[in-house]
Image: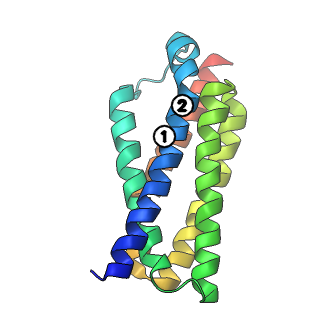
Amino acid sequence: MTRKLLIRSSFAVLVCLIFGFMGTVATQTGVAEWYPGLTKPRFSVDVDIVSAVWIVMYVLMGLAAGIVWSKGFYHKWVKTALYHFGFQLFLNGFWFLLFFALEEPFIALLDLVVLFIMILFTIKWFRIVNVMAAYLLIPYAIWVLLTIAYNFEIWRLNS
């Protein structure tokens, strides 16, 4: 691993974890007051497990972004890939705000659908720059699909 790759990957992981932390802050009120009273689907998972999975996803996302960034931000494909990455990261953080803080599961569901589409575009652009970086985002895409199913069921069961 080159020094440039290590530094950029470490920075990208840190940025992703900061977004995750901001999501955690947004969830605090909802998890304490609103969320426990919701009817949840049978495939509901303990909040601690979900939190641990999100941490792993943020690390994988950061590693992928660091790999792409290390190819040189001057390159138009790298810029395009990282712009897509930044937009999907914003949508990711926005979901926590919509779902937990604002208690709007339907709007949060719409955000997740757009997020999933952006993840697919990000994977496409990451693949052009570096195949391994694209592969690192696949577990994240799957996790977001599961989150879409869960969010949909929360909305359906509590509407």
- Residue closest to the eye, 84 or 17: 17
Whole-angstrom CA distance, mark 2 to mark 1, is: 6 Å
Q: Are marks 2 and 1 in contact (CB under 8 Å)?
A: yes
Secondary structure of the residue carrying tag 2 is helix
Where does residue 137 sit, x and y in percent of width and height? 44, 63
Residue 156 horizontal side relative to residue 124, left or right: right
Where does residue 101 sit, x and y in percent of width and height? 64, 26
What's the residue type where badge 2 is placed? Val
Dot 1 crowding, Cα within 10 Å, few <14, some 14–19, many 20+: some
Secondary structure of the residue carrying tag 1 is helix
The quarter of the image holding the C terminus is top right
Q: What residue appears at the point 68 percent right and 53 percent down from the top-left corner?
A: 114
Residue at label 1?
A: 21
Residue 93 horizontal side relative to residue 126, left or right: right
Q: What residue appears at the point 49 percent right and 56 percent down from the top-left corner?
A: 15
What's the residue type where badge 1 is placed? Phe
Q: What residue appears at the point 61 percent right and 62 percent down from the top-left corner?
A: 86
| Residue 145 visible to an observer of this rendering | no
Where does residue 44 sit, x and y in percent of width and height? 41, 27
Residue 14 horizontal side relative to residue 92, left or right: left
Residue at label 2?
A: 25
